[in-house]
Image: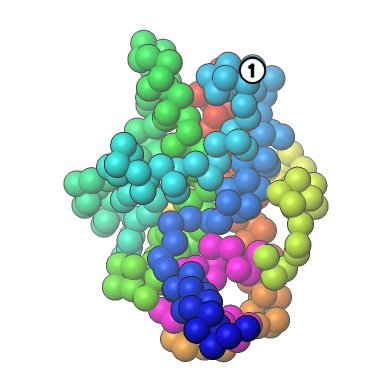
Amino acid sequence: MNIILKTVLTAITAVTFSLPCQAWDKKGHDITAAIAQRHLTKKARKQISELLDGKTIIYWAPWMDDASNSPEYKYSKTWHYLDISKGMDVMDFVKKDKKGDIIVAINAQIETLKNENLSREQRQLALKFLVHLMGDLHQPLHLGYPEDKGGNTIKVVFFNRETSLHAMWDGAITARAHDWSHTEWTEEIDTYNKKEIKSIVSGTVYDWARQSHALAEDIYQETSEGAELSYEYVRRWAPVIEQQFINGGLRLAKVLNDIFK
């Protein structure tokens, strides 16, 4: 490989690993939606399929990340997260951004879907947003600190490659834990009994946001700026991410089942 090409590829790699990210990566959203799909009632599954032209929620799960970067849906860029300062509560920051935040957006999509007087197009769009946002709600750094933009400005080294804390949590840890498809992930981790599921889906969107923020605070405490991270970090945090996939999927199913009664 010539020196110029090598230099260009190195630069591209560095940019790729340092760009701010918006969500779980595509696989993370697919896993969350696949878990939800398994727990939908027959009635909800039928209505959702009709609303999505025969597609499942898995098909649309990652869609919003690209959509928010398009002119048509640019208004939704702030919906992916809610920045909460250290030691503060969700309610201290929700609704502060006039463009909206993840909690305001989730509640708005739920109300839109419940309103059968609205057009099919409006309800279809709300469903696409909701599926994605419920995944984002369970990526802890989407409820991170405003000072570092949810970990986007905190640089770490993960298996000898510089990245941001946020980007590492979006998908790098998951990819290192297992090289599975979203269906394999779902089969392996979606094993909870009815009593456990009932406990997981209890509470409100605000409660679930608080749980994610509490996890974010643990992550900040255990991950210092410039830390060199590898196998031990994956062993520590991969099970937490798996639990967040489960939480997000089961809670998404609960919300959709309630809507499509």
Q: Measured along the vertical axis of the image, is residue 245 above or below residue 57?
A: below
* Rendering coords of residue 91 (x, y %): 30, 53
Residue highlighted by disc 1: 46
Q: Nearer the viewer, residue 250 or 2?
A: 2
Question: Label 1 amino acid?
Answer: Lys
* Residue 167 place in picture, x, y as percent: 49, 68
**Residue 175 appears in the rendering:** yes
Residue 211 vertical position relative to residue 29 in the rendered view, above or below: below
Residue 34, image quadrant:
top right
Q: Position of residue 146 (x, y in %)?
A: 30, 67
Residue appearing at x 63%, y 52% in the figure: 27
Q: How is the image coloured?
A: rainbow
The magenta stretch spans which residues?
154-174
Number of disc labels: 1
What residue is at 79 percent from the left and 50 percent from the top?
A: 184
Question: Which of the pair 233/15 is nearer the observer?
Answer: 15
